[in-house]
Image (tube, rainbow, N blue to C red):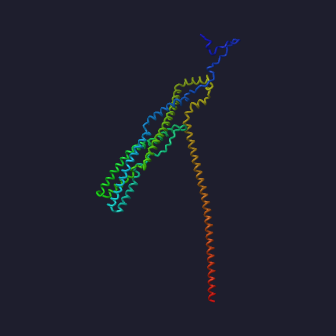
Amino acid sequence: MNNPGNDQNPPEPPAADGTPPAPAEDLELTAPRECPDCRPGALDPLRCRAEGVKEQAAYDEKHKDGPSPEQYETARLQYGKARHDAAPLVKAARDKLDHAFDQLRCIIDDSETVDCLDDAWHHVKRRLEVCDPQLGCCVDDEGDFDADVDDCGTEIVKARIAEYEHRAQEAEDCFKKLLGEPAALTERVSNLQAEVDAVEAEVGTTEAKSLYARALVARRHLEEIWWGFDHPHDYVDCVCRALRISLLARAALSELSGELAVRACRQKARRDRCEHLRAKIAEGIIEEYVRRCHPRHRHDDDDDEHRHHRHHGDDRDDDDRDDDEDDDRARRRRDRDDRDRDDRDRDDRDDRDSYRDRGRRDQEYGRRRDGDRDRGYRRDRDRDRDDDRDRDRRDRDSYRDRS
């Protein structure tokens, strides 16, 4: 049953001439209002952001057992105690070794033989430099990890992830090695004591030159006893640096992994839409016909170029970034060429200035030399005149005396 009271657009009565009335406007179709943008390309960033967050959480969970401030604090305290306990033992070993060297030199009783043994040791020591482990801090990274990749292509993001992973792994390997340094120091001190005691006990009973060579090796172990950390704070600083590099690298890698997951999600969404459209081309034609021929709102009449740009804009992001990178490289190359040209011009100016300065110096030197020569000539001439006057005066005095 027709209920006029509930009809939003009641029919108009027929005109006087009997012509039917014009159809009423559908307010649902013509009412101006703003609609949210629910196109797939606009929704992809919102949906894929969750994939990025999920990937970051998975990355953080995978590396949760990496270096931590608690491990740093424990290592710092353990090394301080090990270093304190080792100091008097190392001093005693050094005194024993010095006494053993004095005894061996007396037994050998030939300075040339001792000098020859020392020279042989220096040659062997130089050959060992390529074989020796690295002493001191095992990480020298500056800690610069940039996770801002909005203007970078996907390949650059992947390359940056690979680089940061390598640097993070190096820092963590160093950190793990440093955690074992307190125990390693205690073991080195124990081995040194046994080695020095053996040398001291065999003085006078073992061939002197062989024992002297063993004493030189013991001295080398004594020099390496602190493993390149001359002071306790050197070790603490190194552990701190390795910890910071690891934490900074993992934080940046977490962000980059999330960004890579977002990009992969958006690329997959675009591929899925393309496959869906290829599978349902007829349905797509009808959907587009309804949108284009029966517009509900003004914003549905966007021109094809705008829709094409919105639909394919993300596909061109990587290409645009690659073009920008090429432009940046060309611009850096031009800047480098300009700097080189400026340097050459500056060098040419400096050479010309130096040549002019050298010419002026030569002229000044020539004038001074000519002046010195003239002054010497006048001085010799005056001296000759004085000698002539003195001779004439002596001759007159002599003639007067004879008269």
Where, by quadrant of the figure, is residue 171 drawn?
top left
Residue 261: give x, y in percent of width and height: 49, 33
- Image spot of residue 75 (x, y percent): 41, 43
Answer above or below: position of 384 versus 190: below
Residue at 65% over, 17% down: 24
Residues 202 and 26: in front is: 202
Residue 86 in the image: above or below residue 324: below
Q: Quadrant of residue 43?
A: top right
* 134 vs 265, nearest the viewer: 134
Between 23 and 10, the one nearer to me in the picture: 10
* Front-lying residue, 252 or 124: 252
Q: Residue at x 33, y 61 (%)?
A: 106
In the image, farthest residue toward the left: 205
Q: State which quarter of the image contains the C terminus.
A: bottom right
Q: Is residue 27 left or right of residue 249?
A: right
Q: Is residue 75 above or below residue 305?
A: below
